[in-house]
C-alpha cells in the first residue's frame, strides 16, 4: 500500500494511539508515602445472569482506597473519562500526581491525555504485555470480585451501584 494512503487512513474509534504512550515511571514500586501522589486505574468486566458490564476503577496507591469508579455496559472512552472526571472533582488538587495505567485504547486517546495534562497529572504507563506492572489494580479487582460478585447473588446492575 502506498505511504500516502497509509497516512490518510482514519483511526478507528477503539484504536490505541501510539504517540500517546508514556514511559513507566513507577517501575513496580507499589508503595508511596502519602495519599494523592500515585493513582492506578484499569477496567475489568463483571458477568452476572449472562450479562457483561465493565467496571472502571481508580485507586490510590497509598492505601488502595477507591478514589472513583463507574460501571457501564460499554468498555469505551466515555467510561474511563467519566471515572477520571469524577476522581478529579472529588480530590480537587491533583497537580503533580502520577497516574498509572496500561496501554489500552481508552488511556491512549487524545481526550484522556488532554484531561490528565490539563490537570497537572503525570502519566505513567505499563510496558506492553507486562501484566505484573498492573499488580495493584489487578489485585484490587480480583479481591472485589471474590468478595462481592462470587459470594453474593447479584441480579442487577443497580445492586453494584
Image (spheres, helix red, strand yellow):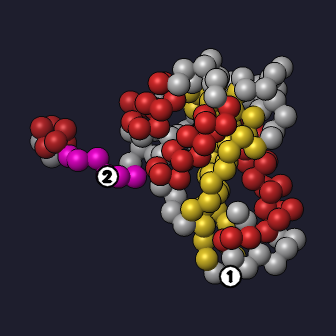
For the point 73% across and 48% down, the residue is: 138
Q: Is residue 43 left or right of residue 7?
A: right
Q: Is residue 143 left or right of residue 55?
A: right
Magenta extent: 9-14
Question: Is there any visible trace of residue 135 in the rendered image?
Answer: no
Q: What element does badge 1 sit on? A: loop
Kindly identify which residue carries mark 2: 12
Which is more toward the observer, 143 or 159?
Answer: 159
Check residue 140 in the rendering and tell me which mark sits there, or answer none.
Answer: none
Q: CA distance from mark 2 to mark 1?
A: 31 Å
Q: Position of residue 26 (x, y in %)?
A: 68, 24
Check residue 49 in the rendering and tell me which mark sits there, or answer none.
Answer: 1
Residues marked 2 and 1 touching at CB (< 8 Å): no
Q: Nearer the viewer, mark 2 or mark 1?
A: 1
Relative to 83, say whether 25 is above or below.
Answer: above
Q: Residues within 10 Å of mark 2 (few under 14, many from 20)?
A: few
Relative to 43, say whether 129 is above or below.
Answer: above
Report which quarter residue 156 is drawn in: bottom right
Magenta stretch, overall SS: loop
Q: Is residue 95 magenta?
A: no
Relative to 145, say whether 131 is above or below.
Answer: above
Q: Position of residue 28 (x, y in %)?
A: 74, 29
For the point 66% across and 50% down, the residue is: 69
Q: Residues within 10 Å of mark 1 (few under 14, many from 20)?
A: few
Which is more toward the observer, 16 or 127?
Answer: 16
Amino acid at each position: 500500500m502506498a505511504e500516502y494512503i497509509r497516512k490518510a487512513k482514519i483511526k478507528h474509534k477503539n484504536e490505541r494511539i501510539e504517540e500517546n504512550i508514556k514511559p513507566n515511571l513507577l517501575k513496580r514500586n507499589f508503595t508511596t508515602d502519602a495519599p494523592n501522589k500515585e493513582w492506578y486505574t484499569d477496567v475489568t468486566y463483571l458477568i452476572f445472569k449472562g450479562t457483561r458490564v465493565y467496571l472502571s476503577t481508580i485507586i490510590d496507591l497509598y492505601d488502595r482506597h477507591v478514589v472513583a469508579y463507574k460501571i457501564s455496559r460499554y468498555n469505551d472512552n466515555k467510561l474511563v473519562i467519566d471515572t477520571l472526571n469524577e476522581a478529579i472533582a472529588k480530590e480537587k488538587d491533583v497537580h503533580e500526581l502520577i497516574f498509572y495505567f496500561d496501554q489500552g485504547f481508552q488511556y491512549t486517546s487524545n481526550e484522556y491525555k488532554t484531561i490528565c495534562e490539563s490537570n497537572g497529572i503525570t502519566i505513567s504507563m505499563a510496558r506492553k504485555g507486562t501484566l505484573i506492572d498492573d499488580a495493584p489494580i489487578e489485585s484490587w479487582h480480583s479481591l472485589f470480585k471474590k468478595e462481592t460478585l462470587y459470594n453474593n447473588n447479584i441480579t442487577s446492575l443497580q445492586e453494584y451501584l
